[in-house]
Every structure is written in structure tokens, then in C-alpha cells.
Image: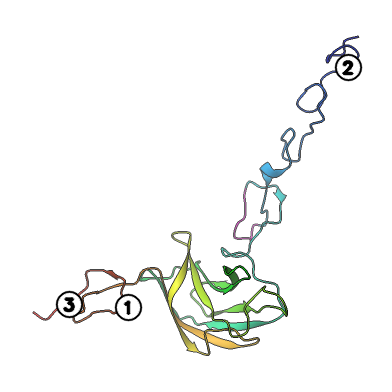
Amino acid sequence: VDLGCGCGEDGPSGCDETCGSTQEWDDCGECGGNNSSCSGCTDTEAFNYDVNAIINDGSCESTPFGNDPDTDCNATILIPGDVNITIDGSPFDIGSWIGVFYSDSNGELAFGGGAEWNGETTSIAAWGAEAGMNNGFASGEEFTWGVYDLESNQAILASEVVMSFGENSYSCNGLSGLASLEAGIIPGCTDSAALNYNPDAEEDNGSCCYIA
């Protein structure tokens, strides 16, 4: 008797209606799928929220740099409302992010703490490494600063950082404050003969002034 797949064999099976198939519909409605086509971050508060995802795959991140380390001690860095933060010489946009980074066991920068800039006084919790682990800042390790520019959607390392008090390095329960931060290219007058020569400028912006 031909049941559809040869003499004595069952007819086409599985969601793909193929002889001998065991394929099933996944939760995304895809035949033979593994739920990946509709998986992602479903937390609307997360930075990488995926509006098309219906299955949470655990990838949600609370900042553009990733999630804060989960360790047992931190230093506090005060970010005052009048802090001077610039990217390529332009003021920092509301909604952009500030972060500090440590060197991991591979010698690569890893996120150690950060804050979203809202134009008001805030602070960063910089998390220290636990004993015998490399999951945060080592005692005395210098903070590497970076910003996430909301306008360009880019993470940029700071080229110059000035602290208002305390050290630009980690200590458990330490306290320090940020005065200014420059990221990207610093524009200004690069002609040393000009009245307003800026030795820190990396790109001339045509602002040089001279005695007539």
C-alpha cells in the first residue's frame, strides 16, 4: 500500500511535509527554526531593546558599553552639572554616556562603570576586581575614560581628562570628581605665531588671530 512515501511507508511528515521529516514549528513560526529569528532583548528599558523580538535571549544591556560589572566594591566619581565635556570641540549632548574602562586579562578595555548624561549632577560607580579575579579595576589602576556620542552612535575614548579632586585611579570606596573631559579631535588654532595658538589643538579650525 502506497501511503505517500513509498510502499508501506507513512506519508509526508513534519512541518515541511517531507517524507521522514521530524521538523517542527518553532516559537517564531518558522518551520525547523531554533527561535533565533524572533529572539533578542525584550526589555523596553534596555539600551539594545529589540522591538521585533518576542523571546528574550538574555542579551539585554543597560548601557551602550555593556552591563556594569557585578563585584563587591566600587569607587565613586562625581560628575557635576557644570562639568565641561566636549566631543570634537562640541558640547556633550544630553542622553549621551560617560564611562570608565579597565584592562582585562587579555589586555583589552572592559567596561567598569558609567552614567547617562542628563545635564545635572550625577556620579559613576567604578567597580573593582574581586580577589583573584580580573572582573574590574585593580587597586591603583588608572581610569580610561570614554564617551558614547548619541548623535553619531559611536564610542570614543577621551584624549584629555582633568579631575576636580581626588585621583584618576581606582581605590575601593574611593571618591573623586571630574572637572573636564575632551574626546575626539581637539579643534583650535595650530599656528604657534598666532595670538590664540592652542598647543593642544589637533586640527586647525581657522580661528587664528594675528597682530595687524
Residue 205 placement (x, y as % from top left): 25, 68
Q: Which one is nearer the viewer's eye here, 132 or 179?
A: 132
Q: Which one is nearer the viewer's eye here, 40 or 166?
A: 166
Q: How far apart are marks 2 and 1 (CA)?
A: 81 Å
Give the answer, above or below, for where 40 lies relative to 113: above
Q: How many labels does the image show?
A: 3
Camera-nearest label, 2 or 3: 2
Q: Which residue is drawn at 62% across and 86% down?
A: 171
Q: Name the residue under label 3.
A: 209
Q: Main secondary structure of the magenta part?
A: loop
Q: Earlier in the sequence, mark 1 or mark 3?
A: 1
Q: Which of marks 2 and 1 is nearer the N terminus?
A: 2
User: Magenta segment, which residues?
Assistant: 44-51
Q: Is residue 30 left or right of residue 1?
A: left
Q: Which mark is residue 12?
A: none
The secondary structure type at the circle numbered 1 is loop
The secondary structure type at the circle numbered 3 is loop
Q: Distance between the residues labelled 2 and 3?
A: 91 Å
Q: Name the residue under label 2.
A: 9
Q: In which quarter of the image is residue 193?
A: bottom left
Residue 196 placement (x, y as % from top left): 22, 80
Q: Which residue is drawn at 55% across and 87% down?
A: 176
Q: Which residue is drawn at 61% across and 78% down?
A: 126
The reply to whether dot 1 and dot 3 touch (C-beta < 8 Å) is no
Give the answer, above or below, for where 149 lies relative to 32: below
Q: Mark 1 points at which residue?
A: 200
Q: Is residue 184 left or right of residue 190?
A: right
Q: Please tell me whether residue 16 belongs to the stretch shown in magenta.
A: no
